Image: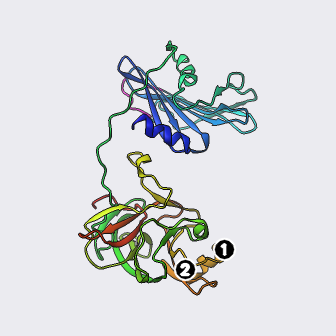
Amino acid sequence: MAREVAARRHAIDQWYMVLLTAGGRPVQTIERWKSGLWRVYLFDDSGRRDHCIDLRPRPDGTLLVTRRHRFWYTAEHREFDDSAAQEMTTVSAEGEVTVKSRPAGSRGWSSIRRDNVLVEDSPIPAPDFGDWLPFTRLLTEQGHECAATLTLHDAPAPPPRPSHPNGVQTLFTPGAQVAAEGVGASVIDVRPAGTLYMPSGRLIVADPTSASTTEPLVAAVPPGDYPVSVSILRSLRYPEMGYVAAARLTITDEPVKAWEPALCPDDDPTLLASDESIGFGVDAGMGCFVDAVAQLDEMDEDRYLDALGSDFAAEVTVAATGANMVVFRTGLGDGGYPKWLGRTEDGRIACFVADMQLIPADA
């Protein structure tokens, strides 16, 4: 990605990665994760990552190495080959160090413990964006001699990625058979999930336990009553098992001609990495559709679970206004799930979809 995008992601605590090279070959990647966490990979002479280092921030503004995982490859080994000799060092929050080793070809680890923290005496300063020199100290452990300055280059732009839900052609096709992530061979069963009353036409897509603090989507629809349906994956091997693959709020039955992310006011799709999408977070194994003026009362997780019972989706009345929300289970449980809107040929909104990403794109 362009360095301007990476800098913006750094400023708002989003993931990005920097690749350091020498003589045209990779020597180190630096990944910035949320909450100030970092991950560094070092490469061997064959271009294989042979050393993974995790770091976390400390109150004094430095970074502490909390885990090192090293591989000793032979010429025959592939990257991260489990049969290679390995050593893993972890540091607990209390400073206790655990070292585990695995000889080449072994299936088990041997462990020893010791009290001293290997990196306490030389913590790494938490860098500002572009200041990668503190991380180059890790390269000297592999015998590299590092220059006093680094030159940054923008990465080539990735090819455009499909802007539509996974398996959009089959998500709501009853009887379609798919290979589902974490479920296996499955058949799709589409079920009605209720009717959502939308007095304002402004939709909130969220975990129901956090919907009262979630901004509505920017795209609005005419006020009215709109049907909700859920796509259920039924395992062919265990047909009694079912998982919600997607939920759809239908505005019109006209065909969808184009898909785009369903954005909240603060969403910025230009900050997305190539494998990311605009989504909503789930901590209670449930999602919901609800109108922005529903004036959500304080309802706990148990109430939503009681409303669902053994079903995949249910309508829940919002006591303060008499409005309703449609609650649905989310895939395999908690996580982050993309939300999309589909438009008709003339640009009107046809539907909103919450996608649990259980089936491959264009399945």
Residue 52: x percent and y percent?
52, 32
For the question of whether residue 83 can be seen, the reply is: no
Query: As rendered, which of 254 and 348 lies closer to the eye?
Result: 348
Q: Residue 176 sits in which quadrant?
A: bottom left
Q: Quadrant of residue 114?
A: top right
Instruction: Give the labeled residue for mark 1.
Output: 300
- Across and down, in percent, residue 237 comes to 37, 69
Q: Nearer the viewer, residue 38 or 74?
A: 38
Specify few, some or many for label 1: CA neighbours under 10 Å numbering under 14, 14-19, or 20 or more.
Answer: few
Do we see residue 71 in this rendering? yes
Q: What residue range appears in magenta?
A: 72-80
Give the labeled residue for mark 2: 308
The total number of labels drawn is: 2
Residue 333 highlighted magenta (yes or no): no
> Which secondary structure lies at badge 1?
loop
Q: Amino acid at mark 1?
A: Asp
